[in-house]
Amino acid sequence: MKFSLGPSLFFWPKNDVEAYYQQALTSKADIIYLGETVCSKRRELRAKDWINLAKELASNSNKQIVLSTMTLLESPAEIQTLRRLCANGELLIEANDLSAVQMMHEQQLPFVAGPAINCYNIATLKVLIKQGMSRWVMPVELSGDWLKTLLQQAEQENIRKQFECEVFAWGYMPLAYSARCFTARSEDRPKDDCQYCCINYPQGRKMNSREGERVFILNGIQTMSGYQYNLVNEVPEMASIGVDIARISADSEQAFTMLDRFGKQLVQAEKYPLDGVEECNGYWHKIAGMSVA
């Protein structure tokens, strides 16, 4: 099983982004994803910058570098940016929207189906494979049992060897997207005049319930889990059911520590106690997502 560093979902200054990915080159990640997936107004790096950074990383390492696309497209300008990414000429694309799937299909190029694409059954998998999908990232809210069953169905349908399976295994989970910007609203700003306030929250803005329990993290138009998902104890199980890649979300430098810890689980499995206040693994075990099994 390999390990990937997912795209950073937060809005960071350009220098911080570049420094982070230079550090990623020396990490235990086999695959590095990068690109803006949340909001096109985050312009510290534009499409040209992301492409150039990705190509630079690819030329300086033997890791696979993948460009990730936006999840929610709302304007013709965003479609043009997407076309530019898909036509980069060298790098694999993670499609987080069906328009990216269509563009890659038109070019007859393989792509990664990102976790935001709602693929829940064998019929949808077949459609994506027909379009050119070479890797599928399971939606974050699904369980290990569900995945095991689906991969068994793929074996029975003789399509399992046509795609890799990747699981979001650590980090704040992207749960939902909206045309509204929740971070701007939390500062009483309209979306059209947000003043790029996301950059003031490098790990999003925490939101508690009335009882004081952290339930979500606001990240622009994206709603994330309040706790960090952590499947470190499930690495042996993931390997046994056929997961090819475990994804560590690039939300902080802690991701590099987790890449090391996840990798060691393949050599000698160790039970790590999860922090019920900061971590969760409920979805994998078919219980409330905020829970720890």
Image (spheres, grey):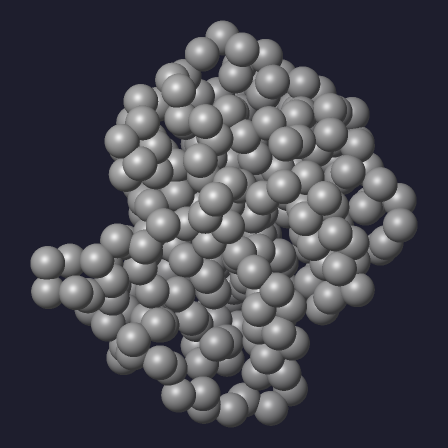
Residue 279 at x, y percent in the picture: 36, 72
Quadrant location of the C terminus in the rendered image: bottom left
Q: Is residue 114 above or below residue 75?
A: below
Depth check: give the residue in front, 267 or 61.
61
Image-based side of 105 in relation to 193, left or right? right
Depth check: give the residue in front, 128 or 203.
203
Residue 114 in view: no
Q: Quadrant of residue 177?
A: top left
Q: Is residue 279 above or below residue 168?
A: below
Q: Residue at x 10, y 58 (%)?
A: 210
Residue 280 at x, y percent in the picture: 32, 71
Residue 156 at x, y percent in the picture: 43, 55
Q: Is residue 120 above or below residue 268?
A: above
Residue 24 at x, y percent in the picture: 73, 58
Residue 283 in view: yes
Q: Residue at x 51, y 24 (%)?
A: 41
Depth check: give the residue in front, 186 or 128.
186
Q: Is residue 204 above or below residue 254?
A: above
Quadrant location of the N terminus in the rendered image: bottom right
Image-based side of 235 in relation to 146, left or right? right
Image-based side of 107 in relation to 292, left or right? right
Q: How many marks?
A: 0
Q: Residue at x 60, y 91 (%)?
A: 268
The furthest residue to the right: 60
Q: Residue at x 62, y 74 (%)?
A: 257
Q: Quadrant of residue 4?
A: bottom right
The furthest residue to the top: 76
